[in-house]
Amino acid sequence: MYDKYVSPLSERYASKEMQYIFSPDMKFKTWRKLWIALAQAEMELGLNITKEQIEELEAHKDDINYDVAKEEEKRRRHDVMSHVYAYGVQCPKAKGIIHLGATSCYVGDNTDIIIMTEGLKLVKRKLVNVIAQLSEFAEKYKDQPTLAFTHFQPAQPTTVGKRATLWINEFMLDLEDLDFCIENMKLLGSKGTTGTQASFLELFEGDHEKVKELDKKIAEKMGYKAVHPVSGQTYSRKVDTRVLNVLAGIAASAHKFSNDIRLLQHLKEIEEPFEKTQIGSSAMAYKRNPMRSERIASLANYVITAAINPAITSSTQWFERTLDDSANKRIAVAEGFLATDGILDLCLNVSDGLKVYDKVIIKRLMSELPFMATENIMMDAVKAGGDRQELHEIIRTLSMEAGANVKEKGLDNNLLDLIAANDAFNLSREELEKTMDPAKYVGRAPQQVVEYINDYVKPVLEANKDCLGITATINV
């Protein structure tokens, strides 16, 4: 078992559920469901297919004789016809009507659509749970003041919860795109060799309405609202591009989330989960590296770049069909889903166990807050009889002096002491201390959290409550 390549996506990152969706068993069982749907629809529209033949097909839809199909493929070098043959061995009464009028793309492309749809549904369930967990975190820490950053430089304070809403908002945008994509997934249907449905028109003796109805019936039987109205032999490969772009969007949001966690862990303000027996570094025993967030970023980079692949494939398809898409999409689409699945499992794990170090957060905030509070201090000094323009220049000079003390001398921020010692402000050190309540400087951040969660997030979670309750298992 150790002498051949094994994908880390299956061994380390993707869940069993997503792996099954892209497994051979899922694919070949879906082929048989599509052959049954085709035969049923053709029978209902008047072709000489019996109920007994359908029942025989139904009886063997799940017990695939893989050994027979494998041996036949060695002879025929054609996977679809090998499985047609194997199905026929199990269903001797129905073997003559299996795949009637269809091309390989009938099972191949329709199955690809079905598998991608199921993959998107699993992605959605996990994404909804990430949003739910981050929402709980945001509500819990809505009032916790923290230093905000612009350009990763200290800026006007926000709250820990408000920062979390920024992560949630990006995932919410992804959910909108994901819902649109799922809602608009359509089967290829039964389009024939070049998309003209000529073979089916022949089967139904020139009856165009029956051929149109055949498409509708197949879609309904497979649980879809519609088929693509026109196509060549295959569905447009732009569908793959659309799907992978949605996955890439989720990956980008997860990357931003993981970046922030990594930076905050460097600051010792917030940490991802770290198990009691976990080793952070082989050399430095004290280290607690943010390996899960780093893995999110790593897999996200892969998915983001993978989205280019189907776009190139789509743009280079010739006329009604070429086969230079097949090997490529088998890899690109499947791995895009498996990697996204791994990303979301990691996001679930990290968001469920974030550790907030409030004392470190406040210490850092208070070391910078005097700089942030200068506007309020200046207004208090004006109320005490000072000149606004004069005070502005003085406080600017004093801020530069305090900043130099911090950066050049390694001293604590002594701006309040400098201001208290300056007669122009007419404010005591005690009066200045009263301006140092961090809650005064977070604006509407706590209220924004409450309003955003209640007005935007909770209605979405309520609408998707059947998705809630998923927990993630991290393999390594």
Image (spheres, grey):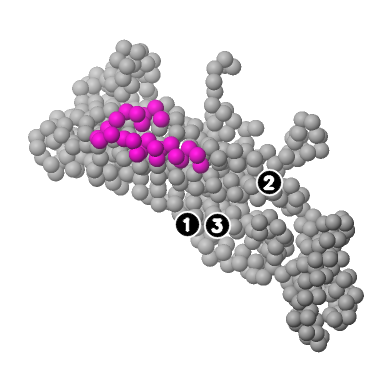
The residue identified by callout 1 is 463
Asked whether 214 falls inside the magenta stretch, the response is no
- Kindly state the secondary structure of the residue where label 2 is placed: helix
How far is disc 3 from disc 1 in space, using C-alphas? 17 Å
**Reading the chain from its start, which is encountered first: label 3 or label 1?**
3
Disc number at residue 169? 3
Q: Amino acid at mark 1?
A: Ala
Q: Residues within 10 Å of mark 2 (few under 14, many from 20)?
A: many
The residue identified by callout 2 is 262
Residue 262 visible from this viewpoint: yes
Front position in the image: 20 or 403 = 403
How far is disc 2 from disc 1 in space, using C-alphas? 32 Å
Disc number at residue 383? none
Q: Amino acid at mark 3?
A: Asn
Residue at the extreme right: 421
Q: Which residues are magenta?
A: 304-328
